[in-house]
Image (cartoon, rainbow, N blue to C red):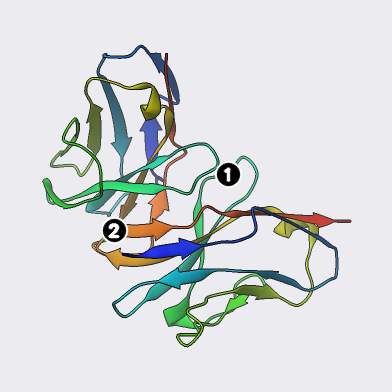
């Protein structure tokens, strides 16, 4: 069984740019969630997708958006990047509700 | 509002000594608490959840609603226990509220 995979692992952007991060969920999992982890902090919930629809959102502005595809893979898009968006972005998949299986993350640096 | 507090950012214990990682929570609903762990160069993974009341790798955690705590304990620490530990409150679906984490170092 394949685990959660994320791409890219590292990337550097400048303020105002847009970024797309990708996640392939673990085989059999139909729910994907995204977390932002700033340095020295715990993961912070951004949103989750179930059956291709967003069905839960944390305290993040609309410039954070996402998609889930029929194969349950997912994208996180962030527009108009700010310096404060620099963080590790974690994707986690699960079967409905339950144990989260995390990817290794995408480290975004905004200059 | 919900909150998870892990008061110790760093914790060092000697091998064979007992270890306790503290976690306090604030939540108006019925809490479901979890401990997640991240070993060096590995991804974040579930260690245990209070509902299952199980012992994983010698660790246990009891939910104390009176003290609003979910401390993680192990009677005899091992070097392989060195890792980053996060206490997490399950809100709904895949939405968890994580604490800031405690970095545990077990000294040989």
Residue depicted at 25% across the width and 33% down the height: A76
Name the spot of residue A2 as percent of width and height, x first.
40, 45
Report if the CB atoms under discs 1 and 2 are less than 8 Å apart: no
Q: Where is residue A78, by image quadrant?
A: top left
Dot 1 or dot 2: first in sequence order is 1
* Residue B59 is at least partly visible in this image: no
Q: Nearer the viewer, mark 1 or mark 2?
A: 2
User: A39 or B57, which is in the foreground?
Assistant: A39
Q: Give the class, few, some or many, for how many residues have Cα within 10 Å of label 2's Cα (few <14, many ≥20).
A: many
Instruction: Tell me the chain of label 1.
Output: B
Secondary structure at badge 2 equals loop
Residue depicted at 44% across the width and 36% down the height: A105
Q: Is residue B1 above or below residue A68?
A: below
Name the spot of residue B65 as percent of width and height, x first.
45, 85
Instruction: Tell me the chain of label 2.
Output: B
User: A73 or A85, which is in the foreground?
Assistant: A85
Q: Is residue B1 above or below residue A51?
A: below
Residue farthest along the front direction in this orientation: B1
Name the spot of residue A55 as percent of width and height, x first.
14, 54
User: Is B20 displayed left or right of B42 in the figure?
Assistant: right
Residue depicted at 51% across the width and 62% down the height: B5
For the C terminus of chain B, the image quarter is bottom right
Name the spot of residue A56 as percent of width and height, x first.
18, 54
Q: Which mark is residue B42?
A: 1
User: Is B103 displayed left or right of A5 in the figure?
Assistant: right
- Count of all numbered marks drawn on residues in the image: 2
Secondary structure at badge 1 equals loop
Q: Give the class, few, some or many, for how many residues have Cα within 10 Å of label 1's Cα (few <14, many ≥20).
A: few
Q: Is residue B107 above or below residue A89?
A: below
Q: Where is residue A19, by image quadrant?
A: top left
Q: Which mark is residue B94?
A: 2
For the N terminus of chain B, the image quarter is bottom left
């Amino acid at each position: 069984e394949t685990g959660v995979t994320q791409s890219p692992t590292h990337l550097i952007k400048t303020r105002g740019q847009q970024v797309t991060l990708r996640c392939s969920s673990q085989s059999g999992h139909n729910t994907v969630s995204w977390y932002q982890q700033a340095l020295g902090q715990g993961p912070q919930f951004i949103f989750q997708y179930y059956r291709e629809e967003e069905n839960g959102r944390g305290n993040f502005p609309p410039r954070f958006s996402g998609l889930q595809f029929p194969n349950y893979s997912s994208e996180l898009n962030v527009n108009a990047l700010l310096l404060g968006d620099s963080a590790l972005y974690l994707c986690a998949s699960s079967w409905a509700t339950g144990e989260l299986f995390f990817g290794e993350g995408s480290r975004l640096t905004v200059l | 509002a919900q909150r998870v507090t892990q008061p110790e950012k760093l914790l060092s214990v000697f091998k064979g000594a007992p270890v306790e990682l503290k976690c306090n929570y604030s939540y108006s609903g019925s809490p479901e608490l979890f401990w997640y762990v991240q070993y060096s160069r590995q991804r974040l993974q579930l260690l245990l959840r209070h509902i299952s009341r199980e012992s994983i790798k010698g660790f246990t955690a009891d939910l104390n609603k009176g003290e609003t705590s979910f401390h993680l304990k192990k009677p005899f620490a091992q070097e392989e226990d060195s890792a980053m530990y996060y206490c997490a409150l399950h809100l709904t679906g895949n939405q968890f509220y994580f604490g800031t984490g405690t970095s545990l170092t077990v000294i040989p």
